[in-house]
Amino acid sequence: MINWGSGYFLGLKLAFILIILGIEFYFIVFEKLMEKDISYQEITIFSFLFIASIVLTILKISLISIFIPFSGYIFIHFLQEKNEKYLSEKLEIKRINELKEIISQQPNNYKAYIELGDIYFKKEEYSQALQFYKTAYRIKDLPLIKHKISISEKEQKIKEGELWICRNCGEENLGGQQKCKNCGERKDVIKSITADLKGVKKYIFFLLISPIIVLLIFIIIKFLPLYFSVILFLFMLYLAFRFFLTP
């Protein structure tokens, strides 16, 4: 007969922790190592985190161990995105200064004006982009530059609320019109806001849902049977990796 004493459940708890740590190691380190999508610095950091988790497991057999590598992954992922954004902005500023230096030496270099306009257009600073496109057009009358000016003027009007584009038929409408003059579709502000939020969905998710996740984890650990806890926790871990921690 099986002894259902505290030692048995302690063994199950230890097995559960080691299984979770093994799964985390596979997704966070091993899989990325096979795909050559992880740096030596990251390997060092994660190795330290997993060693710390194993030491804590041996000493305390604490469920906190399973959150150490996972929390480290989220933190490093966040820092990487911030660093990439910073480097991108730094390169952008450097290129803007280079182009302005070229223009100071070659005032008729229309290509430099176009590239500057493209940079500011990408930054959604359409009024700045227009200035450079119009200067380039005065130097060189090209259909391409004229098209860029037209697009920038339209985007500037949309940004200022003077114009909106119907999502149903693509018709241009004045900012004060609440329905499309062509198909009658209503001006859809909610969809526009939703589209803008897509770029930051990961952080919004963690900001709004984190308290619920913490509560669920507490319930899993405290009240649910161990076998069900394992299945539910693995499913939550899969969802986090699948939808929120992968590009």
Image (cartoon, rainbow, N blue to C red):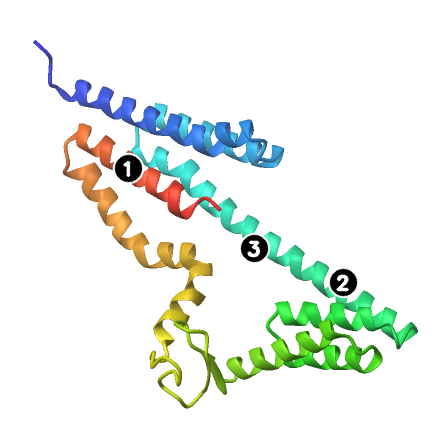
Q: Distance between the residues labelled 1 and 3?
A: 28 Å
Name of the residue lying farthest toward the top = 1
Residue 82's tag is 3
What amino acid type should be assigned to the residue bearing mark 3? Lys
Q: Within 10 angstroms of label 2, few (less than 14), some, or many (20 or more) residues?
A: few
Q: Does residue 13 appear left or right of residue 92 in this picture?
A: left
Q: Distance between the residues labelled 3 and 2?
A: 18 Å
- Does residue 52 show up? no
- Does residue 19 show up? yes
Residue 122 place in picture, x, y as percent:
62, 67
**Going from the N terminus, do you reach mark 1 or mark 2 first?**
2
The answer to whether residue 67 is above or below residue 128 is: above
**Going from the N terminus, do you reach mark 3 or mark 2 first?**
3
Residue indicated by mark 1: 235
Q: Is mark 2 on a helix, strand or loop?
A: helix
Residue 94's tag is 2
**Going from the N terminus, do you reach mark 1 or mark 3 first?**
3
Residue 210 place in picture, x, y as percent:
32, 53
Q: Does residue 8 appear left or right of residue 147 in this picture?
A: left
Which dot, 3 or 2, sits closer to the camera?
2
Residues at discs 1 and 2 in contact (Cβ within 8 Å) = no
Q: Distance between the residues labelled 1 and 2?
A: 45 Å
Q: What element carries label 1?
A: helix
Which dot, 1 or 3, sits closer to the camera?
1
| Residue in view at x 57 percent, y 35 percent | 38
The answer to whether residue 177 is above or below residue 74 is: below
Q: Is mark 3 on a helix, strand or loop?
A: helix
